[in-house]
Image (cartoon, rainbow, N blue to C red):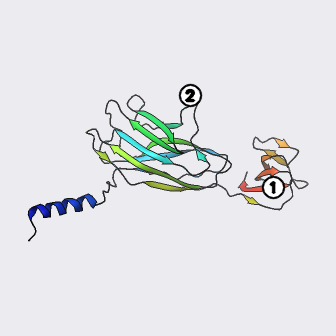
Amino acid sequence: MRSPRLLFVGLLSSMLLMPVTASADNTLRLEPLEISAGETKELTISLDNDMDITLVQFDLKLPQGLSIPVNSKNRFRVAITDRTTLEDHSINVNAIDGIYRILLASMTNTVIEGNDGALFKVTLTADETFSGGTISLEKIELVSPDEIAIHPISVSIDVQTSSAIHDITTPPHPKGQSAYDLGGRKVSRAWQRGIIIVDGRKVSYSRKNKLLDKNENH
């Protein structure tokens, strides 16, 4: 018969090896996003919680070509919604090896209002190299007023591009088709660099006699 001490050690060891699963009722959620190269859009990050939360921290990982721009004060453009205020919570964003660590904390231990809905609005810019990918939230930590920390599992979404670009062999600016820039002004040289509107379609000219079809209706 095994001694009580050995039974206790065995039970303790098995408990330490058990995976810790955070409550599904306290987690962050990424809302769907559609963005294409050259665009700037907002990513919404929501908080679903069944307990009071005062602190939220996580790492935001973006695919290649997607980044958070900075404002005139050289601060990353990450905003909070009306679930709290900048008087009650401060927000801090740092870029570490291409990953954005975002911290929302309260010096007064103020609780974030509500139990679900958008908490962060993150401005994202897609450069010309962006072709889609996965956005993920990792190392999530939620802390209650009595300093109970919850570590939900990572969450992610696949980012959709609003249009695919395909090479076509149509010659630039066929005779009889008018061309306009994105401001609605008529242009006389359809093979100029950049995106213009030809025959109701957005097209991008990378160089003379090279046409990239955006497959979008004006």
What's the amino acid at mark 1? Leu
Vertical placement of residue 122 versus 3, above or below: above
Q: Nearer the viewer, residue 176 or 163?
A: 163
Q: Are marks 2 and 1 in contact (CB under 8 Å)?
A: no
Q: So how many labels did they put on this image?
A: 2
Q: Position of residue 18 (x, y in %)?
A: 28, 61
Vertical position of residue 67 compared to residue 175: above or below: above
Which label was assigned to residue 39? none
The location of residue 64, given as percent across then percent down, is 60, 51
* Residue 12 falls left or right of residue 117: left
Q: Residue furthest right?
A: 175
Observer-side mark, 2 or 1, equals 2
Residue designated by label 2:
73
Q: To which quarter of the image does residue 209 belong?
A: bottom right
Residue, x 67% and y 46% (percent of image)?
38
Identify the residue at image location x=67%, y=56%.
163
Q: Residues within 10 Å of mark 2 (few under 14, many from 20)?
A: few
Secondary element type, mark 1? strand
Quarter in which the N terminus is drawn: bottom left
| Mark 1 burial class by Cα count in 10 Å: few <14, some 14-19, many 20+ | many
Looking at numbered disc 2 in the image, what kind of residue is underneath it?
Lys
The image position of residue 126, as x and y in percent, is 63, 47
Q: Is residue 4 left or right of residue 61?
A: left
In whole angstroms, how far apart are the C-alphas of marks 2 and 1?
Answer: 39 Å
The answer to whether residue 38 is left or right of residue 191 is left
Residue ID at (38%, 54%): 153
Q: Position of residue 23 (x, y in %)?
A: 31, 54
Residue closer to the observer: 162 or 158: 158
SS at mark 2 in the image = loop
Label 2 vs 1, first from the N-terminus: 2
Disc 1: which residue: 211
